[in-house]
Amino acid sequence: MDLQLAGKHVLITGGSRGIGLACARGFLREGARVSLAGRRQDHLDAALAQLRAEGHGAVGGHAADLGDARAALGMLDAAEAAFGPVDVLVNSAGAARRTPFDELRPQAWQDAMQAKFFTYIHVMDPAIKRMGARGAGVIVNIIGMGGKVASPTHLAGGAANAALMLATAGLATAYGPRGVRVNAVNPAMTLTDRMAEGLAAEARLQQRSEEEVRRHAEARMPLGRIATPEDIANAVLFLSSPRAGYISGAIVSMDGAATPMVV
């Protein structure tokens, strides 16, 4: 299926690794121009070298601490100076540390909001205003199931996720009349480097080995496996495309039906 993304400028925060990098590959295969944003220049350099070695040319990178609103705005300005106005923003940067509930302190809750909520808001705020002024644009926020299903090892991060879901739905309603669609996907456990951190926290809570926790997690998945970054990227690409032109304000759960829920 032609997703009609050729020539679009896609900005992906957290695009140097994991789900963000899988999204970058997908958009590049569709003929889009892709800007990657991330905190660490070395990770960006490695991702850019990998993508270019795979034959992708229309890709650039911009290092910035997205926890700083000014740095996020500067990154957006640099991306648009290089490839033109951003047509699609995919937010995948920022992750709150998983912490067993007995280890939580007030600072951990503040850190979670800074790491997850504000890294998204600092980019979304200027980007959606520019999209609205132009009368077109798409934002897809990659959030996480922790905001839908409370986990004893992810309460602070889950609270940040829940706040992002509300922001997603609210901005979709506010900016729909200005031609901007905003959606979110909520992955559950996904085969990325970050999965190891979650397994370690869960193992400490359960006083079991990380391997036991992983085997148990896989056994509970109705589809018989843990999601890959490409699984999540495929949904992001569709939601970003004109093929999903009447989908806005949606929060898509991506846990392979592990948690039966209606909303």
Image (cartoon, helix red, strand yellow):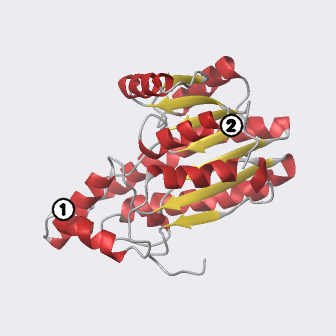
Residue 70 marker: none
Q: Nearer the viewer, residue 92 or 240?
A: 240
Judge depth for marks 1 and 2 and give the one in front: 1
From mark 1 to mark 2, how far is it between C-alphas?
40 Å
For label 2, the SS is helix
Q: Nearer the viewer, residue 14 or 192?
A: 192
For label 1, the SS is helix
Question: What's the amino acid at mark 1?
Answer: Glu
Sequence-first tag of 1 and 2:
2
Residue at 68% over, 61% down: 169
Residue 211 pos. (x, y %): 18, 63
Residue 137 pos. (x, y %): 76, 42
- Toward which corner of the image does residue 101 lie, by quadrant? bottom left
Residue 11 vs 144, above or below: the answer is above
Q: Which residue corresponds to mark 1?
A: 210
- Say left or right for 143 vs 131: left
- Say left or right for 208 vs 233: left
Residue 48 pos. (x, y %): 47, 24
Residue at 47% over, 68% down: 255
Residue 127 marker: 2
- Say left or right for 130 vs 188: right
Query: From this viewpoint, is residue 102 visible?
Result: no
Residue at 42% over, 44% down: 18
Residue 204 pos. (x, y %): 17, 64
Q: In which quarter of the image is the C terminus?
A: bottom right
Q: Nearer the viewer, residue 116 or 230?
A: 230
Question: What's the amino acid at mark 2?
Answer: Ala
